Image (spheres, helix red, strand yellow):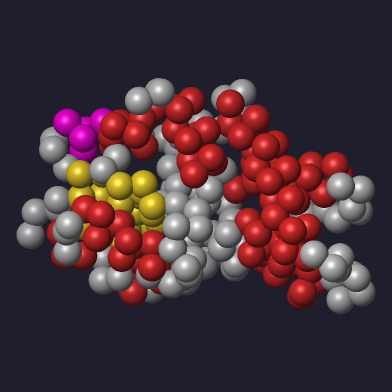
Amino acid sequence: MTTKAIIFDVDGTLADTEDGHRQSFNKAFADNGLNWHWDDALYNKLLKVTGGKERIKYFVSDFLKDFDPPADFEGFVKNLHAIKTAHYTTMLGEGHIPLRPGIKQLISDAHNAGITLAIATTTTPENVSALLEVTLGADWQSLFAANGCGDIVPHKKPAPDIYFWVLDKLSLSAADCIALEDSQNGLRSSLAAGIKTYVTTNQYTRDQDFSGAAGV
């Protein structure tokens, strides 16, 4: 069957963004007077949870047993994540995080060949826009027929919700598409939606289990 659409994850797939996220979290913690620091080893463990706000909550619940959360914990997390996002988008705007090798050419070739392109990610719309405006240009949205990101669905990866949302927007079946992912959670999400998936690993995901992938 001819591939009609390619659905891209963003963080770790389009660009090696995860270390930029890690640094931005640490800056947000410092801005808030918190003595928290996520090094590479800890961040690798935290990546088992998708979504920045969810990752902060997981860190507090599983790694900070003695932390006394504020009364408005949800507001605390939301504010902390907003500050982190501001640091991260500044980093992207300064061009510190390029696309991974071959990605820009793949997007261009697929678009020119008439293959529909879409995004399925847990990262925020602000993060996606900041990355792709710098790397693909101000009209980057014209390249993608669907942009599924952030909290647009109730359950984040490894749940398949974001892929079902994208398939609905594209009016395509899972069999018409392939997905590109970088993590076990992402792979579980796309496979649960019935989409053939190829995986490109990075420093944080290379040792994960990619059983079921069409290629790694």
Q: Quadrant of residue 28?
A: top right
Report the residue at 78% width, 65% height from top.
Answer: 73
Q: Is residue 87 above or below residue 29?
A: above
Is residue 44 in view? Answer: no
Image spot of residue 108 (x, y percent):
26, 31
Q: Number of labelled discs?
A: 0
| 66 relative to 151, above or below | below
Write the start and end of the magenta stretch as one range.
Answer: 108-112
Relative vertical location of residue 2 with respect to residue 195 in this rendering, above or below: above
Q: Find residue 76 and report its horizontal and vertical position in percent.
A: 78, 58
Examine the image and state in which quarter residue 93 appears.
top right
Asked whether residue 21 is drawn in magenta, I would say no
What's the residue at 64%, 31% (across, down)? Answer: 91
Asked whether 151 or 38 is in front, the reply is 151
**Front in this rendered view, residue 214 or 154:** 154
Left or right? Give the position of 80 relative to 64: left
**Magenta residues: mostly which secondary structure?**
helix
Query: Which quarter of the figure is the N terminus placed in?
Result: bottom left
**Whole-percent x, y for residue 10 in the image:** 45, 47
